[in-house]
Amino acid sequence: MSLFTEAFFIFKKGRRVFRDLPPFSNRGSSDDPPKGGIMIIFVAVELKELFKKKRNYPWPRPKNCPRCNDYKVWGHGYAQAIFDGYNEPLLLKLYRCPVCGCVVRLRPAGYFKRFQAEVKTICSGISHKEEHNKWLSGISRTRQRHWFRALRRRVKACLGDTWTQGLLKAFDHFMAQGQVPVTRSI
Ligand SMILES: [Zn+2]
């Protein structure tokens, strides 16, 4: 798996499944940010190391600008983001392309953007509820309910009432399409 492939993994019956999504350039043009927009690249990140080293964490540097392919992107500071298990925001590295003005934000693989729980945790919560009609212990019920309802709503809106393959399959389906299965915006 290349460092700069958008990569997600989920747990399926206890087995970790890697999923490589097509690179940005192969996707619809609607994903291209406007000039000066933000591009998110998912990379392998050791969150514990990041927590310890903060600005000294050895982030990889994209070889090219993912938007215009120019040969160089420059460091552009950091953005704070909250992740489960850490009591203060972690610093995510930003780069900026001097040619097209695009800002590249690196995010840890295994987390959806704007979600602080790991994808595998969200997936286990939904799977547990679907199989046993109970919420997982140790994780806030409010959040699990939020994920569950958002996915159900998305299934209804995007796949219709005729979808009979269950929520986990739908979760997989949306992931494969490069979508966040549990986001409220459709
Ligand atoms: Zn560029």
Image (cartoon, helix red, strand yellow):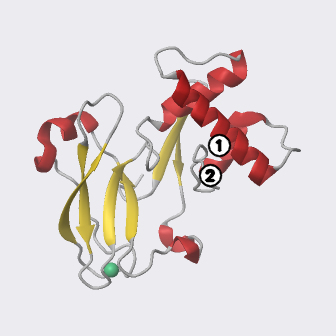
Whether residue 12 appears in this view of the structure is no
Residue 69 is situated, as x and y percent measured from the top left of the image, at 35, 80
Q: Quadrant of residue 63 in the image?
A: bottom left
Q: Residue at x 86, y 44 (%)?
A: 161
The answer to whether the residue labelled 1 contacts the one labelled 2, judged by CB atoms less than 8 Å apart, is yes
Q: Which residue is mark 1?
A: 172
Q: Residue at x 27, y 37 (%)?
A: 47
The mark tally for this picture is: 2
Name the residue tied to disc 2.
176
Task: State which quadrant residue 89 falls in.
Answer: top left
Q: Amino acid at mark 1?
A: Asp
Tell me: 158 left or right of 144: right
Q: Is residue 140 left or right of residue 77?
A: right
Task: Provide residue 84's location: percent of width, then percent of height.
Answer: 36, 31
Q: Mark 2: which amino acid? A: Ala
Q: Is residue 70 visible?
A: yes
Residue 98 vertical placement versus 55 (above, below): below
Left or right: residue 92 compared with residue 180: left
Query: Circle 1 sits in a helix, a strand or a loop, which is it?
Result: helix
Q: Is residue 182 above or below residue 6?
A: above
Query: Against 69, is 171 above or below?
Result: above
Image point (47%, 46%), residue name: 112
